[in-house]
Amino acid sequence: MQQTEDQNKAAAELLEKRLRLLLDVKAAETGAEPSFSEIAAFLRERGTNLSRSRWTYMINGHRKVDDAEVFAGLAEFFDVDVDFITGDSDASTPEKVKAQIDLVRSMRAGKVKSYATRTLGDLSPETLRAITQFLDQEMTQ
């Protein structure tokens, strides 16, 4: 029984990671992360329902979701092979996703730098440089 729970948790976490990556890639391509409403409307036009609670489970890795219709619709929305979304071990990262990963990392680092600057108030130039160097090192790993 424990093995199955561990497998379900791993599947939920893998789906979360892949969906978050796809959301970031879409944001890099379009300038804005797609909203739940956009994604749900896209799926609804294709005859598939996606509830907000199910979407929340999926993008937060809370529960294993196994819905072929939803996965097929999401694959179409993000323009990737459904095997990438379902976590098929043989599915490699799509080329368009690989091409955007560096941009996505830069965007994430930029958000962190901006957040740190706003949250921590007046930072000395040395502190800001130290934060920037740390984030740059993390991005290259």
Image (cartoon, helix red, strand yellow):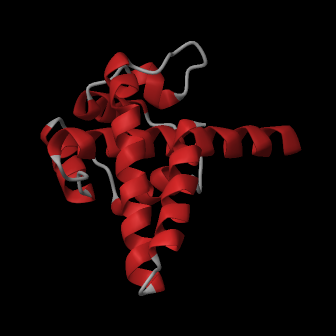
Could one spot residue 69 in this view of the protein?
Answer: yes
Q: Depth check: 120 or 7 in front?
A: 120
Q: Depth check: 123 or 38 in front?
A: 123
Could one spot residue 65 in this view of the protein?
Answer: no
Q: For this view, does 3 lie left or right of residue 140?
A: right
| Position of 14 relative to 84 (above/below) | below
Question: In which quadrant will I find the C terminus?
Answer: top right
> Residue 137 location, x and y as percent?
57, 45
Residue furthest out toward the left: 45
> Residue 138 location, x and y as percent?
58, 46
Residue furthest out toward the right: 2
Q: Depth check: 71 or 17 in front?
A: 17
Q: For this view, does 25 lie left or right of residue 16?
A: left
Q: For this view, does 125 lie left or right of residue 69?
A: right
Q: Residue at x 32, y 29 (%)?
A: 75
> Residue 4 location, x and y as percent?
78, 39
Q: Residue at x 24, y 57 (%)?
A: 35
| Position of 127 relative to 28 (above/below) | below
The quarter of the picture where residue 6 lies is top right
Q: Residue at x 50, y 16 (%)?
A: 92
| Position of 127 relative to 3 (above/below) | below
Q: Depth check: 36 or 114 in front?
A: 114
Question: In which quadrant will I find the N terminus?
Answer: top right
> Residue 128 location, x and y as percent?
47, 69
Residue furthest out toward the top: 90
Q: Residue at x 37, y 57 (%)?
A: 110
